[in-house]
């Protein structure tokens, strides 16, 4: 069944749209979200990554740990992202060397493969919070404390 993605409780509360959630439901949901977060004490690059890929893994993982986004369960997703990105980058120079007028079939196959790798990278990046839009879904909006309203403002609002 299609629907909207579930947002963390802190995001809903930050937007001021949590009036429909009771205190008991909020407590249960917060406990469940904390339980689902997972630990991040074993975020280590898998052995199957190449040396250069491991360095990139560690760099990205460090940033995601600082944002409290990644957990031990996300290690393989990050590794697959880095592998797909590496293959995507490797195909660029190969495609540029091809002349589409002389070898259209090879050019088309490689271009299609590169597009698939690009889509795969975008999907993994979104899952991991590596894109600005995916991070914005997780950011808690700051709430500005409302100034105390006078009795007239309470009664008449902005009509004064």
Image: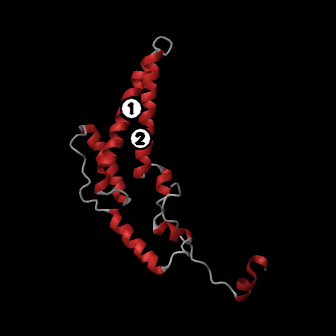
**What residue is disc 2 on?**
121
> In the rendered view of the protein, which quadrant contains the C terminus?
bottom right
Q: Is residue 127 above or below residue 102?
A: below
Q: Position of residue 19 (x, y in %)?
A: 56, 76
Kindly identify which numbered label has been placed on residue 69.
none
Q: Position of residue 86 (x, y in %)?
A: 35, 35
Instruction: State the residue lying farthest toward the left.
Output: 47
Residue 154, quarter of the rendered image: bottom right
**In contact (CB < 8 Å): disc 1 and disc 2:** no
- Disc 1 to disc 2, how far (Cα)? 11 Å
Q: Nearer the viewer, residue 97 or 59?
A: 97
Q: Position of residue 63 (x, y in %)?
A: 36, 53
Instruction: State the residue lying farthest toward the bottom.
Output: 151
Task: Give the SS element for disc 2.
Answer: helix
Badge 2: how crowded within 10 Å, few (<14), some, or many (20+)? many
Left or right of 73 on screen, residue 133: right
Q: Is residue 148 above or below residue 52?
A: below
Q: Residue at 24% of width from left, 38% of height from top?
A: 51
Q: Is residue 32 above or below residue 122?
A: below
Task: Give the SS element for disc 1.
Answer: helix
Which circle, 1 or 2, is nearer the viewer?
2
Q: Residue at 55% of width from left, 75% of height from top?
A: 20
**What residue is disc 1 on?**
89
Q: How many marks?
A: 2
Q: Position of residue 119 (x, y in %)?
A: 45, 38
Identify the mark nearer the N-term, 1 or 2: 1
Badge 1: how crowded within 10 Å, few (<14), some, or many (20+)? some
């Amino acid at each position: 069944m299609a629907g909207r993605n579930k947002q963390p409780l802190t995001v809903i509360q930050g937007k001021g749209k949590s009036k429909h959630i009771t205190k008991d439901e909020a407590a249960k949901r917060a406990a469940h979200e904390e339980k689902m977060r997972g630990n991040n004490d074993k975020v280590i690059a898998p052995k199957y990554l190449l040396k250069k890929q491991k360095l990139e893994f560690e760099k990205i993982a460090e940033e995601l740990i600082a944002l409290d986004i990644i957990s031990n369960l996300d290690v393989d997703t990050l590794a697959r992202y880095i592998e797909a990105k590496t293959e995507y980058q490797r195909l660029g120079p190969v495609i540029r060397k091809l002349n589409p007028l002389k070898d259209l079939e090879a050019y088309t196959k490689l271009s299609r493969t590169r597009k698939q790798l690009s889509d795969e990278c975008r999907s993994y990046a979104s899952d991991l919070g590596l894109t600005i839009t995916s991070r914005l879904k997780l950011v808690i909006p700051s709430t500005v404390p409302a100034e105390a309203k006078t009795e007239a403002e309470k009664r008449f609002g902005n009509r004064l």
